[in-house]
Image (cartoon, coloured by chain):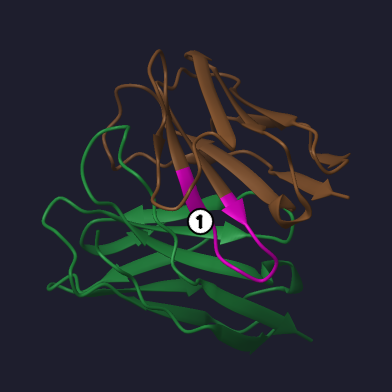
């Protein structure tokens, strides 16, 4: 199946700094990618929908100035956690579907990025 | 968005068949039902998808009754490595921009 790759797999940063997470579709193009956050023992929570060439769409309660999303190409979306604080520590996961497919096609998920803010 | 309801957790012994049922009473005509598996500290992995009746692949079967208000994921002869969280998702509209909303999932624990 198609592969979605995230980088880095884990990152530790100091409080107040910014962290960028990359999400790449390795063997397919994706006009839309999704960013999720997952806290321990909880389900995935959709944060935003990343649209190639346009602004991201954020879910209610997610601060767009806090979580900057850039989808500059059909194979790359980035999530930047700005001015990170310990409460931003979480597992961040991206997903994508191939361009042009209908809902019956599976979505592919990255391996996730474990962010720890100290 | 069609909401899904699953049991929070299930336990099974190795070698048994496990059936996880998901309720989705508000499923729409165009919605598909998809199941994902997630291991700790990994992204979800696609298991199976269906629209109606029965779908089977190399790892699981998916049973969907005629009213489509529920679905059952069947895992034959589970092993320890099947210990994971299983999510039932229902799509809200067609197109690649369709969001996938995760419910609570079912935490399956397989023991010897």
Q: Nearer the viewer, residue B3 or A57?
A: A57
Position of residue A17 in the picture relative to residue B104 (left or right): right
The hue used for chain B is green
Residue A57 is at least partly visible in this image: yes
Q: Which chain is brown?
A: A
Q: Quadrant of residue A25?
A: top right
Position of residue B91 in the picture relative to residue A118 (left or right): left
Which image quadrant: the N terminus of chain A? top right
Q: Which residues are magenta?
A: A37-47
Residue B76 is at least partly visible in this image: no
Q: Quadrant of residue B83?
A: bottom right
Q: Which residue is mark 1?
A: A45
Q: Residue visible at 88% across and 50% down?
A: A118
Q: x%, y% of residue B44?
A: 58, 52
Q: x%, y% of residue B108?
A: 62, 78
Residue A11 on the magenta segment: no
Residue A38 on the magenta segment: yes
Q: Quadrant of residue A68?
A: top right
- Residue A103 position (above or below residue B47): above
Q: Residue visible at 32% across and 34% down?
A: B97
- Residue B72 position (above or below residue B55): below
- Residue B11 position (above or below residue A62): below
Q: x%, y% of residue B7?
A: 47, 84
The chain ID associated with circle 1 is A
Q: Residue visible at 82% across and 41% down?
A: A10
Q: Nearer the viewer, residue A95 or B83?
A: A95
Q: x%, y% of residue A83?
A: 72, 37
Q: Nearer the viewer, residue A79 or B14?
A: A79
């Amino acid at each position: 199946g198609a592969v979605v790759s995230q980088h880095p797999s884990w990152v530790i940063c100091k409080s107040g700094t910014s962290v960028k997470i990359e999400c790449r579709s390795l063997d397919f193009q994706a006009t839309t990618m999704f960013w999720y956050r997952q806290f321990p023992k909880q389900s995935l929570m959709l944060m935003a929908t990343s649209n190639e060439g346009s602004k991201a769409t954020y879910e209610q309660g997610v601060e767009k100035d806090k979580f900057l999303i850039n989808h500059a190409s059909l194979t790359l979306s980035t999530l930047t956690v700005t001015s990170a604080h310990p409460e931003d520590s979480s597992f961040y996961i991206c997903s994508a579907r191939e361009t042009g497919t209908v809902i019956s096609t599976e979505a592919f998920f990255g391996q996730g990025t474990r962010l720890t803010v100290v | 968005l069609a909401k899904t309801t699953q049991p929070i957790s299930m336990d099974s012994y190795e070698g048994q068949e496990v059936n996880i049922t998901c309720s989705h009473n508000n499923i729409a005509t165009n919605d598909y039902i998809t199941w994902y598996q997630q291991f700790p500290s990994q992204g979800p992995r696609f298991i199976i998808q269906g629209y109606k009746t029965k779908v089977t692949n190399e790892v699981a079967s998916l049973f969907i009754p005629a009213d489509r208000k529920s679905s059952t994921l069947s895992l034959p002869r589970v092993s320890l490595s099947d210990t994971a969280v299983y999510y039932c998702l229902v799509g809200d509209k067609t197109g690649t921009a369709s969001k996938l909303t995760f419910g609570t999932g079912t935490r399956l624990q397989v023991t010897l």
